Image: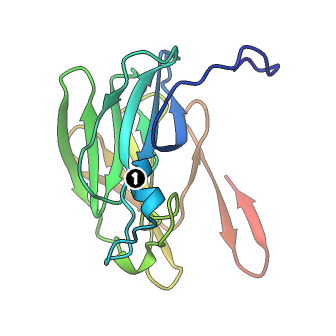
Amino acid sequence: INADGSNEKQLTQYGYNEELVWSPDGIKIAYKSSPQSVLNSGETRPDCINYHNIWVINSDGTKPFQVTDSEASRSVPSWSPDSNKIVFTENEKIIVYDLVNKTKKTLATNAYYDKKLNQCSIGSNTGGSIVAWHPRDNTILHFSPEFGNDSKAQLFDAQDGKVIKTLDRFGAWSPDGARIAYTEHTDSASAYI
C-alpha cells in the first residue's frame, strides 16, 4: 500500500501472517506465519507454544519462500544490512539464515531462554526474545528477559557467534548504528541513549 493509503495489494493468501519486516534494499519482506488450520482448531501446544514459521516474499507478492518448517517458537526476523540474511530466535537458539545459499546456522544458544515466559497466544510466544541486526555491520543485538522480569542483552558477532558485550538492557539501534536507545523501568519508565 502506498503511504497515502492508495494502491493496496494483498501479498499472502493463507495462514495468519504478522510482524512484517522490509529488507533494507526494499525488495523483500520477511514475516511470521501460522497455519490457518492450527488457528481454526484452537490447538494449544502442551509446552505452551503455538508454532509459526518464517517466510520471505518479494514486495510485489511474488516468490514466497518458507524459511523454516518445524514447530518452534520464533521471534520477529531482522535483516542483515546487505538484505541477504535474516536472524531470528528459534526456541533457545539464535539462527542466521542465508537467503542466497539457503543455509541455516545456529549462531548461539540463548543462555537466558525460559519456556515459562512463553505465552499461549499467537504473536506472544517467542519467550520474549528479540533480535536486531546492526544497520551497517555484522553485529547482532539480542535481548531475552530472564524469569522474574529481569533482562539481559548481548551483542554477538554475526560471523562466529562470539559474544562481544553483555548489556543490562535492550533497545533499538540508531540509523547509523552508533548508539542504542533503551528504556529503564523503575518507578516510572525513562528513556536513555
Single out the residue that lies furthest toward the right: 4
Q: Place residue 5 in its image quadrant.
A: top right
Relative to residue 50, is residue 9 depicted above or below? Answer: above
Query: At 50% from the left edge and 60% from the top edge, which residue is drawn?
Result: 122
Q: Residue 26 or 67: which is nearer the viewer?
A: 67
Q: For the view shown, which residue lies furthest in the bottom direction?
A: 148
Q: Can residue 143 be seen in this view?
A: no
Q: Where is residue 100 in the image (x, y as percent from the top left)?
A: 24, 20
Nearer to the camera, 175 or 38: 38
Q: Residue at x 45, y 37 (%)?
A: 14
Q: In which quarter of the image is the N terminus?
A: top right
**Which residue carries the number 1 mark?**
37
- Give coordinates of residue 21: x percent, y percent: 52, 34
Residue 47 shows in this picture: yes
How many numbered discs sit on the rendered protein?
1
The image position of residue 45, as x and y in percent, is 34, 72
Vertical placement of 18 versus 117: above or below? above
Percent x, y of residue 12: 49, 29
Q: Which of 80 and 52 is in front in this view?
A: 52
Point 47% across, 58% down: residue: 40
Badge 1 density bin: few <14, some 14–19, many ≥20, Cα 10 Å: few
Q: Is residue 179 left or right of residue 68?
A: right
The image quadrant that residue 102 belongs to is: top left
Q: Which of 27 and 40 is in front in this view?
A: 40
Compared to residue 147, the image places residue 189 above or below, namely above
Instruction: Examine the rendered structure and indicate whether residue 98 appears above or below residue 106.
Output: above
* SS at mark 1 in the image: helix
Amino acid at dot 1: Ser
